[in-house]
Image (cartoon, rainbow, N blue to C red):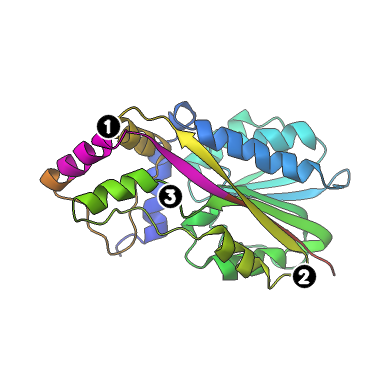
Amino acid sequence: MSPTRKDRIGAAFGAATAGYEDHAGVQKVVAKTVADLAGLLKVPDGARILEIGCGTGLLTREISLRWPGAELVATDLSAEMVGQAAKGAMIAGTFLPMDGEHPWVEGAHFDLILSSLAFQWFDDLPVAVTRLARLLRPGGSLIFSTMAERSFAAWRAAHGVCGVVAGVPDYPSLGDVQAMLGAQADAFAFDEDYVLECGSAKGLIAHLKGIGAVVPVEGRAPLSPGDLRRVMAAFDAGGARDGYHVVFGRVTRVS
């Protein structure tokens, strides 16, 4: 049986585990922001917390600092990243490979569900958010960050100049996420932009490889070497600067 897209995503991130945090500047800032947002809530002592897409533990460590007495379940598609997060964690917990879009847990179990820059890998974000919200206890909250439409706009534009299409997914707008969350009784979303100083197209590609974000949208074939060289030249000519556009969302279960 050939590997699924989720299998390929997990394998790509697993291969990047050792050097991930050397390339994850934006990811560190975004993870701390997710934790800061959660810190505004009244989270009970001994809270049950689920983390989706823990990676190497950027958000996990923030959870450890804020809620050292929590009962934590940290998960990721990549077994290698889960292992790395467990090594660096400052909190007792359960660390296991799991597709956060299809959690193994059922019922209202968690006081807090946190995720930073993992939801963009989901196949059906609205369904996944609804599914995760059902795992919250009354008064519990899901807080997440996910990639949004302006991410890697310069890289996409360089492809357009060359008449080809980038393998980067078509991320939702803030309005899309707000409309999606409109189905929830208590929810909100906002967005932020982060500059990525990559220096050159080679620097951008090194960044993406370094964090394991190398699996293209389903059905988009890799560029030929010649097309890739043309795109890289167009990107460099355009300033060799790009960015992340991130949406932060919160859903609180009313009853």
Amino acid found under the numbered disc labelled 1:
Lys
Determine the residue located farthest toward the left in the rendered image. Answer: 226
Disc with the residue nearer the chain's start (2 vs 1):
2
Disc with the residue nearer the chain's start (2 vs 3):
3
| Image quarter (top left, top right, bottom left or bottom right) of the C terminus | bottom right
Amino acid found under the numbered disc labelled 2:
Ala
From this view, report whether residue 46 is shown above or below residue 140.
above
| Residue 83 seen by the camera | yes
Q: Position of residue 152 (x, y in %)?
A: 39, 45
Determine the residue located farthest toward the front in the rendered image. Answer: 238
**Crowding near the residue tagged with mark 3, few <14, some 14–19, many ≥20 C-alpha atoms within 10 Å:** many
Amino acid found under the numbered disc labelled 3:
Gly
Q: Secondary structure at mark 1?
A: helix
Residue 87 versus residue 187: which sits nearer the camera?
Answer: 187
On the image, numbered disc 3 is attached to which residue? 10
How many marks on residues? Answer: 3
Write the residue at 29% across / 53% down. 166
Left or right: residue 43 compared with residue 52: right
On the image, numbered disc 2 is attached to which residue? 185
Q: Tell me, yes or no, whether the two marked residues, 2 and 3, touch with CB atoms within 8 Å.
A: no
On the image, numbered disc 1 is attached to which residue? 202
**Crowding near the residue tagged with mark 1, few <14, some 14–19, many ≥20 C-alpha atoms within 10 Å:** some
Magenta segment: 228-246
Disc with the residue nearer the chain's start (1 vs 3):
3
Q: Position of residue 69 (x, y in %)?
A: 83, 38
| Image quarter (top left, top right, bottom left or bottom right) of the N terminus | bottom left
